[in-house]
Amino acid sequence: MSIQIRSIGPCIGAEVTGIDLREPLTPAQAEEIHAGMDRYAVLVFHNQLLTNEQHLAFTQTLGPLENTARNTLRAAADFRLPPQMADVSNLDGNNKPFARDDRKRLFAIGNRLWHSDSSFKAIPAKYSLLRAVSVPSKGGNTEFAHMGAAYEALDDETKAVIEDLVCEHSQLFSRDLIGFREFSAEERERFKPVRQRLVRTLPRTGRKSIYLSSHAGTILGWQLPEARLLLRDLMEHATQREFVYSHKWQVNDLVMWDNRQTMHRGRPFPVNEARDVRRTTLMGEAPTVAQQDEAVAA
Ligand code: OGA
Ligand code: MN
């Protein structure tokens, strides 16, 4: 079977056909997927009826998994999936939607802010692979914005300003934006900020992108109000519709995105309906910037 990759978005997103993700990938097929990711940043695979184990196995043929445990407030009673998988659904351990005012849900809906996965980790994520097991009757799209195209559309003066800037990222900063501010001492310690470059270069293509995320809350050496305003301006610029692909989910879709050159966000859906989406994550290759000792050791 040969793989076809067809562009579906403005400058981002392609649909992949001619591949069954339950079958082992040949090295040539894996390379076609990596090349497709470099070029389109988001790849959509429809009608992939996978078990969790097949989803994990496919992911591991593309690289080593990231450990996503402890990124959420879910406790053992809410675990539904293998430990290497992130539960991005709105479901508790009994497969029931979390109540509207459940603290775990209110933390989790922070992913409706534009972000890049694990930008709050010293070595942030490479690809994320999200699979839909059930979808709500309306809403719940995932939107993706291309940070390479957004970088290229900046004026030269702004490019020069941001070239060497370093930000601090934390889930505390993104949650602060939606007024979620009550954290225990243990959670504050767990969500301690890490540093990331504001401009990064994709290793295989040399293409630069703005490494932006709602987790970014400070710029080293800048006063906070100026830092927040610059980050806000960049966010507004980078999420204009010309850089965005919006994915409307169907059951058995698997969507894979490159966190190094995109941001994404979830969109709202009815609170009492199930949206069962499950994610595997590939580990990044290196930190974007040297970390303070404690952050690297964590
Ligand atoms: C994610 C994520 C958004 C969504 O899986 O990392 O942010 O639409 N998902 O579920
Ligand atoms: Mn995410």
Image (tube, grey):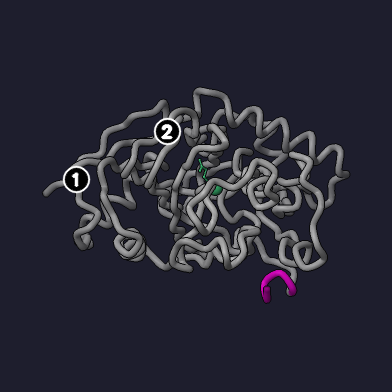
Q: Residue 228, position in %: x, y? A: 79, 39
Task: Specify whether residue 43 is painted magenta.
Answer: no
Where does label 2 land, which residue?
Answer: 247
Residue extending farthest to the top is 241
Q: Residue 207, position in %: x, y? A: 48, 44
User: Which secondary structure class fits the magenta region best?
Assistant: helix
The total number of labels drawn is 2
- Within 10 angstroms of label 1, few (less than 14), some, or many (20 or more) residues? few
Which label's residue is closer to the chain start, 1 or 2? 1
Identify which residue is drawn at 75% across, 52% down.
Answer: 172
* 282 vs 164, nearest the viewer: 282
* 112 vs 170, nearest the viewer: 112
Identify which residue is drawn at 72% across, 61% down.
Answer: 191
Give the quarter of the image for residue 293: bottom right
With 291 as the anchor, is 7 left or right in this view? left
Amino acid at circle 1? Ile
Query: Image height check: is 54 above or below 273?
Result: below
With 86 as the anchor, is 187 left or right in this view? right
The quadrant of the rendering that contains the C terminus is bottom right
Amino acid at circle 2? His
Where does label 1 land, which residue?
Answer: 3
Q: Residue 206, position in %: x, y? A: 46, 48
Q: Residue 272, position in %: x, y? A: 54, 37
**Magenta part of the protein: which range?**
294-298
